[in-house]
Image (cartoon, helix red, strand yellow):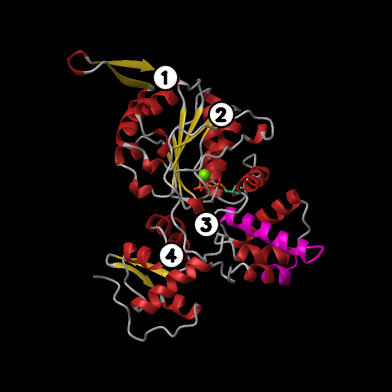
Amino acid sequence: MAIISSKTPPNPEEKPSKSGTKSVKSPAQQGQLPLTDKPTVVGQPPPQKAPDAPELLQADRQPEENAKQEEKIRPQSIDEYIGQRDLKEVLTIAIQAAKGRGESLDHLLLYGPPGLGKTTMSLILAEAMGVNCQITSAPSIERPRDIVGLLMKLQPGDLLFIDEIHRLSRVAEELLYPAMEDFRIDITLGKGQGARTQSLKLPRFTLVGATTKIGALTSPLRDRFGLIQRLRFYEIDELTQIILRSSELFRTEISQAGAEEIARRARGTPRIANRLLRRVRDYIQVKNHPRIEQAIAAEALSLFNVDPCGLDWTDRRMLTVMIERFNGGPVGLETMAASTGEDAQTIEEVYEPYLLQIGYLSRTPRGRIATPAAWKHLGYEPPTQQLPLLS
Ligand SMILES: Nc1ncnc2c1ncn2[C@@H]1O[C@H](COP(=O)(O)OP(=O)(O)OP(=O)(O)O)[C@@H](O)[C@H]1O
Ligand SMILES: [Mg+2]
C-alpha cells in the first residue's frame, strides 16, 4: 500500500485549524516513503489559546518528533488495533466479503471524537485490502479542481480517506455524489452559453470519510455511505493495553498499575494515553527512575495538571467558569467560548464529548449545564435546587 497524497488535520487538540498538513505513512512503509506533502490550501491560524493553558491537550512542542513517535506506535493491523470490538467485527466481515468477490470495499463513514483511531483504522483497511490509501482532509479540497484532481488520480480499488468530511464545500460534495454512486465525475467545460458537461469514468474506489460531527453531514452525503460506524471512547483496560504496547515500542519499563494510572487519566482516548505516557516517560528519565510505577505516574501527571479522572486545565476552567459565573448554567456555547478564551468548535469537538460521557456536563436546548458531579469534583457544594433541564 502506498499513500499518494497525505494531508491530515493537525492533532485533534489543534482542530479546527486548517493549517496542519502532516504526513501519515502507511504502516507497511514507515520510514521509506517519499511523500508528497504540499498543502493546497493555506489554512487559518490555529485558535488563540489562553496564555497559561498547559500544553498536554494542545499541540506538543516538538510536532515533528511527536509525529514520528505517533507513526511508530500506530497499530498496523486489525489484530494490533485494541478495543472497538464491534467496529473491528463489522470491518473484518466487510473486508472478507469484498475480497471474496474481488471487489472494493463499500464506502465507509467513521465518526467519533478526535484521537480514537479513525485515521489508523483507514490505514489498516487499505493495508488489509492491499490497496493504496490517499489521504486528504475536506478543507484542502474546497475548489472543484482539487477534488477533480484527486478523483482523477485514483487507481482501481484505491482507498480515498477524507478527514473532517463534514467540512466539505458544497461544490466538492456535489462532485462526490456521482463519484461515490456511479464512479463517474461530471465536469463542466467552457463558460456561458458554450459550456457543456462531460462525464468521466472513474475506477471503483472506496471513500472513507471521518468526522467528529456526524450531525453536520448533509443527508445525501451520509446516505451514500454503505457503512456508517461510530468509534466509542475506550475502557480503562483497553487504554491500559494500549499504554503497555506503546511502552514496549518506546522501550520504557512500566508496571501494570503504572499503565492503569495513566489509562485512568487518558479521557478514553488512545492519542491522549500515548501523549501522557510520553510525558511520564520524560519525567522518570529526568528523575532517574528505572520504571513507571503507579505513584510516579500519578506524581508526573499531577505536575502536568491532569487530574485523577483525566480533566486538564481547560476542562476544569470551563466547568469552574460555568459554576462561578453562571451558577452552573445553562450557558450557551458561544458564551462559554468567550468566557474561557477557547474556540467554540474546539470546545464542542474536543472538550465536551468527554465531559458529557463522564456525566459532568449535560446539554439542554438552552445551553450547557455543569452537573452536581462536576460541582463536587471541583470542590463546590452543588445547589440544592434542581437545575432546570428544559427551557
Ligand atoms: N485501537 C487502537 N489501538 C492502539 N492504538 C490506537 C488505537 N486507536 C488509536 N490509537 C493510537 O492513537 C493515535 C491517534 O489515532 P488516530 O490518528 O487514528 O485518531 P483519529 O480518530 O484519526 O483522530 P482525529 O479525529 O484527530 O483525526 C494513533 O497514532 C495510534 O497510535
Ligand atoms: Mg485522524
Q: What is the spatial separation of the Cα atoms under label 4 and label 3, in whole angstroms?
A: 12 Å
Task: Kindly identify which residue carries mark 3.
Answer: 233
Q: What kind of residue is marked 4? A: Leu
Q: Which mark is residue 202?
A: 1
Disc nearer the start of the sequence (4/1):
1
- Residue sitting farthest toward the front: 51
**Can you identify the residue that label 4 sits on?**
356
Q: Is 314 rendered above or below residue 9? A: below
Q: Earlier in the sequence, mark 3 or mark 2?
A: 2
- CA gap between label 3 and label 2 equals 33 Å
Q: Position of residue 332 (x, y in %)?
A: 31, 65
| Residue 339: percent from left, percent from top | 37, 68
Q: Distance between the Cα atoms at labels 2 and 1?
A: 22 Å
What amino acid type should be assigned to the residue bearing mark 1? Leu
Say what secondary structure mark 2 lies in. loop
Quadrant hosting residue 1 = top right
Query: Which mark's residue is nearer the viewer, 2 or 1?
Result: 2
Mark 4 and mark 2: Cα distance apart in space: 39 Å
Specify the quadrant that holds the C terminus.
bottom left
Residue 36 is labelled as 2
Q: What's the magenta region?
A: 269-298
Instruction: Tell which of 320 and 205 is nearer to you.
Output: 320
Question: Which marked residue is nearer to the observer: mark 4 or mark 2?
Answer: 2
Q: CA distance from mark 1 to mark 3?
A: 37 Å
Instruction: Give the secondary structure at mark 3.
Output: loop
Q: Nearer the viewer, residue 300 or 235?
A: 300
Quadrant position of residue 383: bottom left
